[in-house]
Image (cartoon, rainbow, N blue to C red):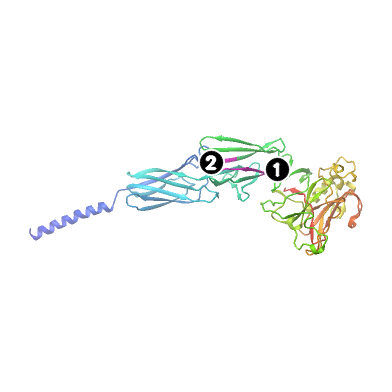
Amino acid sequence: MNKATYSYLLLIYLFLSGCVQESIEEPKMGTVSFSKVTFEHFGNMSPNGRTAAESEWKHIFAESATLLITNKATGQEYTLEYDPNDFSYPYQIELPYGDYTIFSEVEGGDFEYFLPFVIEGEFSLDANRIDHTLHGTTEYGLVSVEKEFASSANLNQVNELIPGSNGKVLYIYAKSGLSPLLTIYEVFNGQALKAQLDIAEHSHYHYQLKLTEIQGVVSFVELIIGPFEYYERYIEIADGGDIPNVTDAEGNVYEVVKIGGQYWMAENLRNSIYCNGDTLETFPYPKILSENPDEGYTTFPMAVIKQRPETGKDIYYYNYEAVTSDENICPCDWHVSTDADWMTLERHLGISERSLLSTSRGADVLAGERLKDANLNEHFPELELREISSRTGFNASPSSYMEVDSPTDDIRTFYLDDFFAYWWANSPEKPLFRAVDFKGLNYYGYGYGKYKIIRSMHRHTISYFPVRCVKNQ
């Protein structure tokens, strides 16, 4: 073979080798479109919306997630960022022909405001363009509450339900296997309605508060709809036109009276759990009381409990720290009565503006008498009630108060047990109280007269008074 022929053949070989190499380095490519995510029993995510087919709940997802795509033959990994909330346009990626696995995960804690999920699957790319549906699973259930008659709701007193996208429903996602306590506070009197839940995955527990004219009845009606396992429950509450009672965080139920435009408790507070669930320290009388100064206490509880022998009922006496705490010792959506609250009440009773800031006032309009319990003589036959037809239903009865001069002093006896009823009535500037006279005494120079309401500031370092709560406006 001559030299020219050899060179010619070598050129042909190199040309053909290049063509083969080029075909190896440039495999066929195709486009994969992801335009839908489906969840078992939770409906589906489609290009035109995010509606769960059975429950009509629009699921809320994390704002972003990552799809991991792996070539089964080569192990090559590809990633695609996407927004699970929005498939109005498909998410696309260009890949070599071949077989692939896909994986995406959004993790969560026990309670979340988005739906955690896992997506797993496979697909084969053997055409210029394919559309693939993502299939997701979740270990979470959904708890929701209609807002129409609910002011707030929480799970386990900690995890608040928040408004959904339409603002009409409160919601939270909860992990399966949990058994949280659902508490719903209705808008009329702040009553706490509670239900124990057992969370299952792919389940939606939806609550509605339903008005009823039957006072004090709370009932649960369960309705199971379709394969989505949608649980709709109704809780019946009293008609909002009247508030028959209110329940505190400890579960105590109180009668409520409307006086003018205000809703007042018709009995004294007897609660030891703040609205947020924290416990308030209480001691029963006479455990912390001592006539011997050597046995005095240097620290004092937030509240003292003393039984009234005439009625057999406990009266709770709270100190200034307890009644001014932001944690709120009254039922949620209620508050400890203030000086301003009392003045509104007193105006309604007919006390003149020029008399409101006086210490002893209202005798001329029988203001104090109208606050007294109409059935007072059942337990206090020695106290005289005037026959009037304009009692308010406030139901005041003798209660007394307790005071301590200093933290090193012994705790004094309860004052004026049979003569006065007392309540905290603070202003932002000073610790005030209100009192109603039952015997017409001139105690501390307040003036004679059984029909007055007393307004004064307490002078001692540590004082304990009963509490009446007023509904927030």
Q: Give the range drawn in magenta.
A: 185-206
Q: Residue under label 2, please give it.
A: 203
Q: What residue type is labelled 1?
A: Phe
Residue 261 rendering spot, x and y as whole percentages: 77, 44
- Structural distance between the alpha carbons of marks 2 and 1: 30 Å
Asked whether 235 or 462 is in front, the reply is 462
Residue 139 rendering spot, x and y as whole percentages: 50, 45
Asked whether 225 or 317 is in front, the reply is 317
191 in magenta: yes
Horizontally, residue 464 falls left or right of residue 81, namely right
Q: What residue type is labelled 2?
A: Ser
Residue 267 rendering spot, x and y as whole percentages: 78, 46
Mark 2 Cα-neighbour bin, 10 Å: few <14, some 14–19, many ≥20:
many
* Residue 47 seen in the current view: no
Asked whether 223 or 258 is in front, the reply is 223
Q: Residue under label 1, please give it.
A: 188
